[in-house]
Amino acid sequence: MKKTSKSRTTIRAKFLLSILPILAVTIILLVAISAQLSKVYLEDMSIAQLDSSITNQSDNIESWLNKNLEFFGTVKHTIETTNPDEAQLQTIINSTYGYNKYAPNGLYIASTNGSFVKAAGSDQKVSNVTGEQWFAQGLTRVNMDYGTAYQNENGEYVVSASGILQIEGDDTKVISADVDLNQISIIVNSGVKMDGAKAFLVDRYDGTILAHPNASYVSTNLDAQTGSFMTGVAEHVKNRDYDSVTIGKYYVDFAEITGSDWLLISYVPKDLILSNIRKLTFILIAVGVAALLLVGVIIWLMASRLFKPLAEITEDITRMASGDFTIDVEAASNDEIGLMADKMKDFIGSMRHMISSINEESAKLKDESESSNRVSESMFNASQSQAEAMQGLNNTVDQLAVAVNEIAENATTLAMVVTDTKDNSDQANASMKETVQISKKGRDDMEHLGTAMNEIKSANQELVVSIGKVGQASEEITKIVGMIAEIADETNLLSLNASIEAARAGEAGRGFAVVATEIGNLAQNSSASAETIAKLIQQVRDLIEDVVKQANSSAERIEENSELIHAAVETFDHIYTNIQTSNDQLEAVVANIQKVSDVATNVAAISEEQAASTDEILETSKNMVEHAQNITSNSQDVAANSNELAGTSQTLADHVAQFRI
């Protein structure tokens, strides 16, 4: 088995390399999410603070406006309730001069006839009373209220609060008071509660900027301003979109001043908010790095403690993979690793028992294979002897066929001689002498034939005995093959159990699974070889039964031929005796010629039948030779299978020897 070397790393290192990046990514994500949430929160908080600031500002402005209107309304109500004359009216107007610091010139009154009453200390200039913007706006209101901003004749940008003065007289009178836009700017900017925020006030009616931190913007028109910020604000004012919004680099909020056409616009730079977000992000990153280092150290210490038993188990598994089952595993904990150690200890015990059993069975298999090899060799030698004996029988039968053919020829000649003797009685003496010679030769041939038949009978009996021995040997081989098959089945079962245990062991049992698979393959090969041997032996037994039947049949025919040959020998003895006395009994010989002719005819027929029988015996002996050769070949196969089984058992023993228990 080819082994490849791999670089190994510990589970602790893999665990740390796996968990630390995840932990780092998690902390980074947490920092990023926290920073984003903090950004959103700070932005929302800043916008809420900006909204709170602008609400506070609008409330202050409304309170300031209402306070001024309350003062103006009180004066108006006083005049309307007292219905003073001109002198009294002037006195009341004079008393308002300098009383309200936001309207230092006090109140003034104008009528449709062009008259104009102001405080004695006021420097206000009015050329055309009825043509003034405040006068026209005052005629539309009963209660005093603020109008649009404008520049008076003194060159000051003011907003006038005016209304109809309801007193007796033919002319309609309007009472009014001016508020300087510079004073409004002070009120607007003093009401900002958010650090870094600024605000300005716009008249929605005509877009006039009533108050602004930059004095150069005051009294200018919003639509006339340049720059993305002021243009964006003008667009929202024009569309009456007063929701909180981001314009350029600023967060912007809008608030309508109740009771007027004024719109308060508050804004704060985004960088001011983002600087706090950046500081918080840096703090979160520092905390994340510190947390990563702290958690990394804690995880490293915990991994060292948790994976220490696993390292010991890994060392034990490494020794097991090299075939060492002498180790002793102890469970040091009651967790999954402890359970692994317990199961590993049980597995080692099972493997020790299994390897011992396999070792014993392989030794038995080796002994049985050696015994089978010896039996196959004995069977091979017996089959070779049988083949040689059958070859000798074949040669003998061949000789018998030649002799029988000669007898047939002699019998035919005898019949011809007897016929000639009957026709040529004059030549009786010469013919009788020839007949004596022929009868002597026939007697000798018949004696040789009898001897050959006895030899064939003995050889046939020896053949039957040898075949019986081969049958007994085949039965012994059948038993041995059955035992080999049982051993192979048991080995296969052990291999299956070993594969199951190796599968339970997982990666650690992979090497042993290969060995178990190899053992299973060897067991299957042994079982297949045993089945092949059993089939071959069954064929041999069938052939042996056929040979036994044919041998018994040949024995019966040989027995019959032996009796006929003995009868022929006795007949030739009788002929020979008669021929000896033929000189004195020539007439009796002539009288018996017919009998001799009949006997010769019978002998010829018997000889022909014997020749046919010898041909059959010859064919049978050839078949027996072929069967004997098949037995020899099968014996060689049995020997080869026995040798293979011996090699298999040796391989199994070598595999088992790799383990130490």
Image: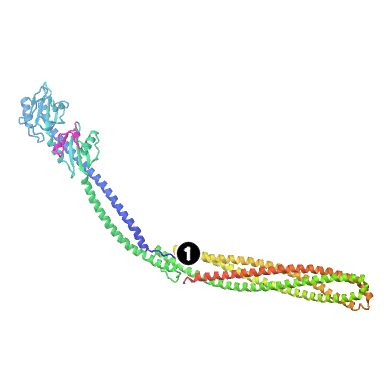
Callout 1 secondary element: helix
Question: Which residue matches tag 1?
Answer: 502
Residue 468 visible somewhere in the drawing = no
Q: Note whether 660 is above or below 45 in the view shown.
A: below
- Residue at the top extreme, as displayed: 170
Q: How is the image coloured?
A: rainbow
Q: Nearer the viewer, residue 267 or 215?
A: 215
Does 608 sit left or right of 316 as displayed?
right
Question: Residue 434's x, y, as percent?
Answer: 87, 75
Residue located at (86% from left, 71% from top): 414
* Amino acid at dot 1: Ala
The magenta segment is: 206-226
Quarter residue 96 falls in: top left
Q: Position of residue 90 (x, y in %)?
A: 6, 27
Residue furthest out toward the right? 587
**How many circles with numbers are drawn on the protein?**
1
Q: Going 80% across and 71% down the picture, which residue do you hit?
A: 404
Q: Is residue 208 magenta?
A: yes
